Image (cartoon, coloured by chain):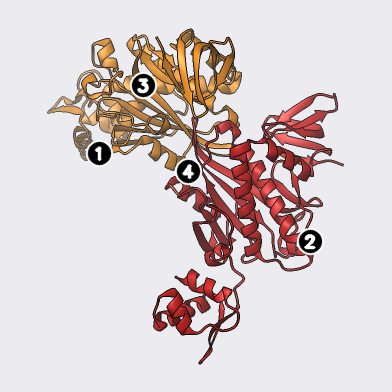
Chain colours: A orange, B red
């Protein structure tokens, strides 16, 4: 109901009388007054003028579900949203929801995280109210061996969304970091629960430094505000990410992984560079020449031999 | 302490005086008396005769941790045991423990399950006190693409253990059912939690019809009691399974997957047969000719083409 009133206020120019809201939303004047109080408590600036009615002057800078869903153009991503002020990690919330049977497309987002997770057990710096910290539950019919594809897909989606919303030239560092000129803007983490025969669910986690001051970020990190030199709407970016993610996910289902690989290559900051890749099996150094059809990075070492790696840490050298 | 007293009783021939137990275990006579009461409540038949002492006459037919650990020859598998009378599913208990950081080798076993899980969302019939229903938490350093190997490894371990303990000629139906002449004796289910870069933990679940009457089992199922025409010790079989599982797991770490594949082939009931394999991608019918090095089943279809499948349901035809 609150969402409905909010939608109505947003779509109205100027003041709307309580009488009209009452008629359109089918509720009493007293109930409307109560909802307006609630909206104000959430940070919406609603002005009430006798004989004129209500007017929405400003929306809060928060990732509220009502804000995210207003104008969201997805079919199922983000149709169910769990929003929290602060959580240890949106990954853990989403994973638990996945275990409990959450529907595909369920979104968990938070204003801040106290134990934000990065790849390989690392931390993700998550200052409150500044970034996007989100996790999405998907239930793909993919064999276990192809789940890594979703990580590359998510990188493409985030990169596209950032570029569309901000015009910052974001690029992908293999496998799934989003960089702006070698400084990290966003990270993606994919967790899953599976039997060997089938994936039960996947949680894709995305962390983006949006309006974060670089002074509170780790070295080598940047934010959209830093790069674009202006504050960005987190809601707008989140909506765009959901849309890109759903679009690429549907494309994967219909056309397979090839279009993802193709777009990934265009957006890559890794290919063509000299890199060192470290994984539990050891180290490879050489030129990153291509991405194979499973998403593995192909490195040509100094002996001219091509080595394919599906996981590991890449450092760009020289 | 109870385990220590039990061990002492088991290793003694004839009666042991309270005084001697008191000295050897370092506890008061009153405390010993209390422990004996507890043992009796668990089903141990402990006889006490004045001036002679205590004697263990019979152990209960239960999968008690003290019984399992007595004489267990593993290094770490089953060193920590969670034992339950009845649970919905040992898989769910073990998975939750895995999430909470349970050490590698943690064993969950139960006398009965109300929602025993089979592959692909199926049920596993788990009548109380008759079968072995166990789940083991492992933390392998395997990439996601190689986890299926553990399922084949578990099938080899269970098959070996059954053969050693019972002399029943158990065989493996791809990927991981244990059969005796086409009737199902045991099933294996592997679940996991992972990031795309690393496996966090794997839960291997094993269900075996041991002393189960075939009348309460699904059609096409059999039990060890039925095949061997005598009641078997569930504890002894479980100990043997833990030992085989650890032995093969250590072999995998040191020598890779090849020895598992080799032994799997020798124990297979599938290779050389005409089969139909069904998976989400469709159906393949032909001769099961080999297992490739990833554990995929290679089927030569009627056009002479070889198709490899890493997952799916196999039906033996004709």
Do the dots labelled 1 and 2 sit on one chain? no
Of A300 and A137, the residue lying toward us: A300
Q: Residue A63 sits in which quadrant?
A: top left
- A178 left or right, relative to A32: right
Q: Is residue B123 visible?
A: no
Q: Which residue is mark 1?
A: A28
Q: Secondary structure at mark 2?
A: helix
Q: Which residue is mark 4?
A: A99
Q: CA distance from mark 1 to mark 3?
A: 46 Å
Q: Secondary structure at mark 1?
A: loop
Q: Are marks 1 and 2 in contact (CB under 8 Å)?
A: no
> Which chain is indicated by disc 4?
A
Of A284 and A119, the residue lying toward us: A284
Q: Residue furthest left?
A: A50
- A222 left or right, relative to B97: left
Q: Which residue is mark 2?
A: B227
As drawn, the label of residue A186 is 3
Q: CA distance from mark 1 to mark 4?
A: 41 Å
**Residue B252, percent from left and from top:** 62, 40
Q: Quadrant of the C terminus of chain A?
A: top left
> Which chain is indicated by disc 3?
A
Q: Is residue B67 above or below residue A167?
A: below
Disc nearer the start of the sequence (3/4): 4
Q: Is residue A100 above or below residue A23?
A: below
Q: Nearer the viewer, mark 1 or mark 4?
A: 4
**Residue B69, percent from left and from top:** 55, 62
């Amino acid at each position: 109901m609150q969402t409905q009133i909010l939608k109505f206020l947003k779509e109205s120019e100027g003041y709307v009388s309580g009488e009209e809201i009452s008629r359109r939303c089918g509720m009493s004047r007293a109930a409307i007054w109560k909802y307006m109080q609630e909206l104000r408590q959430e940070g919406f600036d609603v002005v009430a003028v006798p004989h004129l009615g209500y007017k929405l002057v400003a929306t809060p800078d928060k990732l509220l579900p009502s804000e995210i869903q207003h104008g969201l153009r997805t079919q199922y991503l983000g149709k169910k949203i769990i929003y929290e002020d602060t959580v240890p990690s949106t990954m853990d919330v989403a994973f638990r929801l996945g275990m409990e049977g959450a529907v595909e497309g369920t979104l968990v987002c938070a204003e801040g995280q106290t134990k934000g997770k990065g790849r390989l057990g690392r931390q993700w710096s998550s200052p409150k109210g500044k970034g996007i910290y989100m996790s999405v539950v998907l239930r793909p019919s993919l064999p276990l061996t192809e789940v890594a594809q979703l990580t590359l897909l998510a990188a493409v989606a985030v990169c596209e969304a950032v570029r569309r919303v901000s015009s910052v030239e974001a690029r992908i560092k293999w496998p799934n970091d989003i960089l702006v000129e070698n400084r990290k803007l966003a990270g993606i983490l994919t967790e899953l629960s599976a039997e060997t025969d089938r994936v039960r669910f996947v949680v894709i986690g995305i962390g983006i430094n949006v309006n974060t001051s670089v002074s509170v970020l780790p070295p080598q990190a940047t934010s959209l505000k830093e790069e674009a030199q202006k504050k960005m709407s987190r809601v707008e970016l989140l909506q765009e990410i959901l849309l890109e993610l759903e679009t690429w996910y549907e494309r994967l289902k219909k056309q397979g992984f090839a279009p993802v690989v193709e777009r990934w290559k265009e957006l890559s900051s890794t290919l063509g560079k000299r890199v060192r890749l470290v994984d539990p099996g050891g180290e490879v150094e050489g030129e990153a020449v291509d991405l194979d059809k499973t998403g593995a990075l192909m490195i040509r070492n100094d002996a001219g031999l091509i080595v394919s790696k599906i996981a590991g840490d890449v450092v760009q050298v020289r």
